[in-house]
Each structure stands twice: as structure tokens, then as C-alpha cells.
Image (spheres, rainbow, N blue to C red):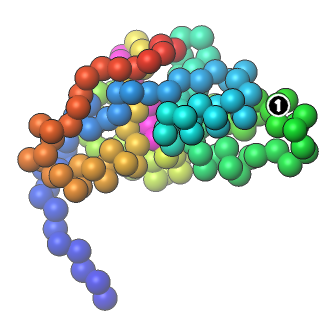
Amino acid sequence: MTTWPDLPRDITAVAVSAVMSRDVLVVGPQDPVVEVWQRMQNLRASVAVVCDATRVVAVVSERTLAVWWPSGGPGEIRRRQVRDIIDSGTPTVHADTTVHQAADLMIHFQLDGVPVVTASGELLGLVTHTDLVRLLALGNTGLGNLDNTVRVTQRC
């Protein structure tokens, strides 16, 4: 049986604002799946936040796109929209939510990322599996090395 060393307890209490990705790809529900895939590949983004007007409605990941990729030829690929493949109502978290709570949501809802929003619902960033693994690799002492510049390229 493999045993894992105990992580310091305080690492689970780190706020998502300290580790979240702030360079977030935002797409709309009406966007064609093929275009979203191309944008994700060009930006090397594994997760995009789906916004409808001013609110976050879902996240879409490379994994989701791959599972729902249409098999009906070029015409079908161009017709399929993000709204056809997402489940609306993705949970969001606030900046002071702990990484432990965010990880629980990601596991429970089988998400590759959770949007981080203000109390009024404004998108601040996205916490992903990669962000959580980076925290584990760097530990609390490496948090100062993370780039926390706000760069949400599009607003909901």
C-alpha cells in the first residue's frame, strides 16, 4: 500500500485568488464548437468560460469538446454550437474560497475548472486542475512567484 506524505494543513486553506488563472478565454453559447476548439488550441487554453451576456453559465473544456465533437461531416461541425454541448448552471466560487472547497466542487461536478466571480457575478478568473497542481508543486512558499496580474481578456 502506498502512503502519501502529509501536506501542511494550511495549503488547503489557500484562497483561490492566490492560484487562479487570470488570463481567461471567454466564449458565448452561440459560438461554433469548431471555432472555440481553434481558439483554445491557439491560446493553449484547456478550459474556457461560457458567458451569456453578463453572467457565467458554464465552462467548456477540451475534454468536453472531444466527447461532443460532431461526426456528421464539415456541415455538422460548423452548425454545432457551444450551447448544444454544455450543461448550464456551472458552480462558481468567490476569490476567498479555499482551494480545498474549489477542488471539492471540481470533483463533485466533474469540472476541469471553476470560474471565480465577484459577489455581483463579475468574472475574475478561473481555477483549474493545473492551478491546483502548481500549488502542490510550489507549496505556500512558491505563491509569491505566481503571476497574479488581472488579464481577463473578455468580460461576461
Quarter-of-image position of residue 39: top right
Q: Quadrant of the N terminus?
A: bottom left
What number of labels is visible?
A: 1
Q: In front: 72, or 49?
A: 72
In the image, residue 41 sits, relative to residue 63, either above or below, namely above
- Residue at the spot x=12%, y=37% of the render? 144
Instruction: Assess whether residue 45 is covered by the magenta stretch.
Output: no
Question: Tag 1: Cα neighbours inside 10 Å, few (<14), some, or many (≥20)?
Answer: some
Q: Residue furthest bottom?
A: 1
Q: Which residues are magenta?
A: 113-119
In the image, residue 58 sits, relative to residue 51, either above or below, namely below
Locate residue 57, reporting x and y percent: 58, 25
User: Is there any visible trace of residue 24 in the rendered image?
Assistant: yes
Q: Is residue 122 left or right of residue 77?
A: left
Q: In front: 146, or 103?
A: 146
Residue linked to disc 1: 78
Instruction: Assess whether residue 114 is covered by the magenta stretch.
Output: yes
- Residue at the spot x=31%, y=53% of the render? 133
Locate residue 16, reporting x and y percent: 28, 36
Label 1 residue SS = helix
